[in-house]
Every structure is written in structure tokens, then in C-alpha cells.
Amino acid sequence: MGLELLKYPEMEEDNVLNFTDSEIVSHVKDALTSVLSGDNNSYNQLVGVMHHSKHLAPDEVALLETTLKALAGAVSSIDITHHDSLLSAIFSMSMWNYGPHVADALAELIVSLAISNGKYLDLCLRMLVSNFTPPPYFLDKLKLSRGLERKGQVLSRVHAAFKKIADYVPLAPLRLLTVVLQGMPTIYHKDRAILIYVENMLKLESGEIGELVGSTMLMAVVDRLIELDVEIGWDAILQDDFSKGIFEMELEDVDDIDECSEPDVGEFRLSRKSLAGNSIAELLDNLLVLTFEHLESCEREGRLAKVFETLLQSFQITVLSAYKSKFTQFVIFYACALDPENCGMSFATMLVELFVQDSQPQPTRMSAVSYLASYLSRAKFLSASFICSMLKRLVDWCLEYCETHNGDLNPNAHRVFYSGCQAIMYVLCFRMKAFVNVPRLRLQLLMPLEQVLKHKLNPLKVCLPSVVEEFSQTGKSCFSFHRVLDTFFPFDPCLLKRCDSFIRPMFVFWSMVKPTYDDAYDDDEDDGSSDDELVRDHVNENEDMMNGWVGKSFDEQGIDMDEFDCELQKMSITPKTTSGHKFGGRMPSRIRPSTSPESL
């Protein structure tokens, strides 16, 4: 058994049950007070009992349980100075090492200490938070049913203790926030430890003290997701030439590709296979699924609308401005999918409001409209009428912008405008079928858009060529693109396997909508009109006006393109690889959804 169990005088294991609770508490108090007179023998025996944690015999378990209960009744006699070794032993104990009876006694002692003296509050909270995760030796046992049973026993007691302490100490939840945030494992800890810790944070959000700590817990979880997200570099995802258009590869097609097959010359590959073995990606995938499941429970409990307010706030603070975020944004996407009528519409409305507000910084407005474009394009759960209303807000704003900006043709001065135009065209690449055959929508949406695209600010020559070309559906246009407007479409297909299984049922893939456009544009050709004509007419009408401007280099025009690139690249979540490239000649007429860095 190792060290021989230390015993109190007159308290042999065989006789311990003959004592009443009050008599045992009295013995413990005597051991505590004897320290003050210089007699440490009984006190040292008391401390020794606390150090027994593994492979205890039944009598040892009984003695430990009894001692913990006695200490809970004698907390008024514990002094933080004279009994520091005892306190240290208590706070280093882990409930994971004991059965339910000892765990109950230990939780009772911690609660008693926390509410007896403010000096112990933080120590008690830290001890409870340390029990969020099991000792390293126990991690592998979590794969077994016994390990999961122990996990449930421990965590239920930990969270019950939080509630009891909060009932007696109103400021305890605020202190708990600090303790939990300080104790969060780093992204380099063992993944199972991080998962269990985050699971407890989400349990706090939905628990009885969630009203006080919930929003902060949820925002901290999103922050940790972002930290992991940005650790996954695009070098780990992209293969081959990533200077292609933004519709190059569809996730649905990737799983069907023979791993041994050779790609075509210049073929762009973006696959979840490229993330295989990436421990950070796997951890992020598991954390996202954990968060999705939490959102589902919130929806079942009728709390999703309240939780969504926190997600919106977190999105604006953390996600919207995050550099290289690739997956975290699917948290809010999934929340919207669970409640399209409220959360789904609120998210889009928030984004469009950010875009049209002149008081917002330019990078914020450009990022917001990129999120809006990707969201409206990909969210299967949004109605066509709502998507149309959002597009109308964008078109109306762009049209008003054209009416008030007729002089300065410097693209550096119109970043927000071009981002809005590009967003509109991108959404229509996915949603045009819903609009072209409705006369009212053509009148309210497409006709004003034609005025915008024909304006001398010339958005068709500044927006991403791949978006313009897919929008025009021509394959025949041959005009020079003077500048690529870098942006990103953050709700591209998710490459995380488990996460994708949640997102896929409510996600619009390009393969779902692309074939319908061929039919739609065939109908347009029968009517004698098409977007091809719009592009060609626009180029012809503006050629003379633009010659004096586009015939010169940007340096000759006095345009600081480095500054232009810098501002736009702040939104980009991938390294810019075509900073000096000018597009010209024929552009590919069929380009697949945006998973390449050009879109980002």
C-alpha cells in the first residue's frame, strides 16, 4: 500500500464509526488548534490523510471521507497561515482520483471554505476549475464507459459547487470568470484536455449561473477558435497553382478524385485531404462540433435568440476583423441555420447595416459586404424574397453612390463601392435563377444594377475578373482588367470533416446552382437580351471616356496602388500572390466556387 496510513489518536479505522459526527469534528479541531501550542503531531497526521489518493483500501476511503467531512465542519478553526500545508494538500486534490462519496465530501469542504472566508474564495474556485480536466493518466480512460461515468460524476459536482458558492457569495461568479479565463489551456495542450475544458465553459454558459458568466464564456470560446483557426496556414491547405479564379474547385468533387490520379496542368487543388494529420485542424474541427452541439441544445431550450446576441457581438469584435479566419465563422452560420427567421435574418441585416454606414471604417465595411455576399450565396435556408431585399439594399446604395460620385475615377477612392458591386455580382452568380423570371424583381433589382455597372466608375474593370466573367456568362468578352479587387468569401465549403457534416445539409454548393444558369441564360438569349450584351455595351460606351484614364499606368495617374493593396489586403485571409498581375484577354467562362486565395 505504500506509506502506512497515519492515524489520529483514539481513531483507529476499526473504531472510527463508533464516533459521532460532532466527536470527529472535535478531534479535528483539536488537531488544528494544537499547532498554535507547538504540538504538530496530530496536525501532521491530519495532513497525511489528505495525501492518500490512489489505490485506497476501503478503510482508507472511509477515513478520508470522514476526515473531509470533519474538516468541513471545522473550517472556522483553519488558519491560512498556520495551516498552509493542510490547505495546500486539500487544494491539490483531484476529484477524478476518488469515488462519489469522497468526491462529495471534498466538494462539501471546498464550498465550506469558500463561503467561510473571502481569503479562500479564489483558492477554492481555482481548485474547482482545475477539476475541469482529468489528470494526464486519466485521459486515455475517457475512451471507456467507466471513464465517461467518472467524468460525469466529477463535472456534475464541480458545477453544483459553483452554484452553492454563488448563492452565498454574490461576487463569486465574477471571480470565477477571471479564474476560468486564466486557466484556459493553450492551443498546444493535449487536444482532449482542451475539449473537456471548453465543454465546461459551455456548461457554465448554459448552467444556473449562466446569466452572470455566459456571454463572457461564449466569447472566450470563439476567441480560442480564432486562435486555432489562424494557426492553420494556407500553405497547409493549398496545392498547385493558387492564382486561379475563385470558382476553381468544389468540395463535393474533391472526395471523388482519385488520390493517385495526376491533376491537369495548372489544376488547382483544395481538399480536406491536405488537412489530414494536421493536429490543430482536427482540434478545431472537434471544438466546432462541440460548439454546434451546444447551439443545438440552446435551440431546444429556447435560449438560442439570447445566445445569438452574444455571437453577433463576438462576430463584430473578433471574427469580422480576424486575419486568415477560415472556419470559425461557421459557428454563426450554423446558429443562423437553426433559426433562419430570427438569427438568419438578423445576421444579414447587421452586415448590410455595417456596409452602408459611412461612419464605419472602410476595412470593416468591405469585410462586412464580403461576409454578406458569401452568406446570401451559400445559406440554403434563406428565402429568395429575403435575399432579394438584401441585394436591393446593396444596389440602391451603389446607385446612390454613382449619382454622387461622377468626378474622381481613382479606384483607390472607391474601395467600398467596388466591394459592394462585386458582392452583388457574386450573389447573383448563385441566385440569378430566382430573379430573372420575375418581372417585378427585374425591375427593382436588375435594371438599377445595369445603371451601376454601366457607370463611368467602371466596376466591371476593377472587381475580380472571375466574378465578373461568371456573372456575364460570356466567355467571349475580351477587355482589359486594370486591377483585381481583392476580397474574400468566407463561407466557402468547409474543409473540416466533422464540421462539414453539420453544415452540408444547409449549404448551397456551386454544383447545385451552376447547371440552372445555362438554362436561364438560354432563355435570355431567346429574348434577345443577356448579361453578355450588358458587359459588351458597357465596355463600348465607356471606352472613349476611359481611354484617357486607363491608357496610363497607375503611377502616371498618381494613384498610390501600394496603399490600395494594403487596405484591401488587410481583409484578405491569404497571402496576396498577384499584386502586380494585370488580367487581360479571354478569361475562363466557367469557374467554380471560391476556395482559392484570390477570393480571399
Image: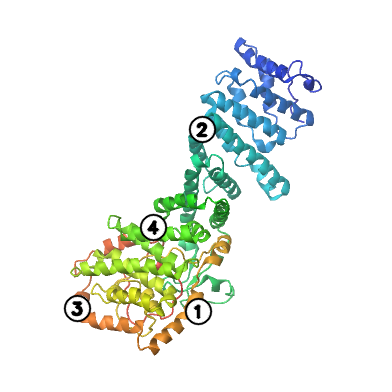
Mark 4, residue position: 350
Q: What type is the residue that disc 3 sits on?
A: Met
List the residue tagged with mark 3: 545
Q: Nearer the viewer, mark 2 or mark 1?
A: 2
The quarter holding residue 557 reads bottom left
Give 166 or 550, whichever is nearer the viewer: 166
Give the mark nearest the N terminus, 1 or 4: 1
Give the SS element for disc 3: helix
Q: Nearer the viewer, mark 3 or mark 4?
A: 4
Does 475 appear above or below 191?
A: below
Residue 578 visible: no
Residue ID for mark 2: 172
N-terminal label among 3 and 4: 4
Q: Which residue occupies the foreground of this view, 548 or 580?
A: 548
For the N terminus, give its image quadrant. Answer: top right
How far separated are the C-alphas under marks 4 and 2? 35 Å
Regarding residue 368, the answer to whether it shows in the image is yes
Element type at mark 4: helix
The amino acid type found where label 1 is placed reads Asp
Give the residue furthest to the front.
440
Identify the image quadrant of the C terminus. Answer: bottom left
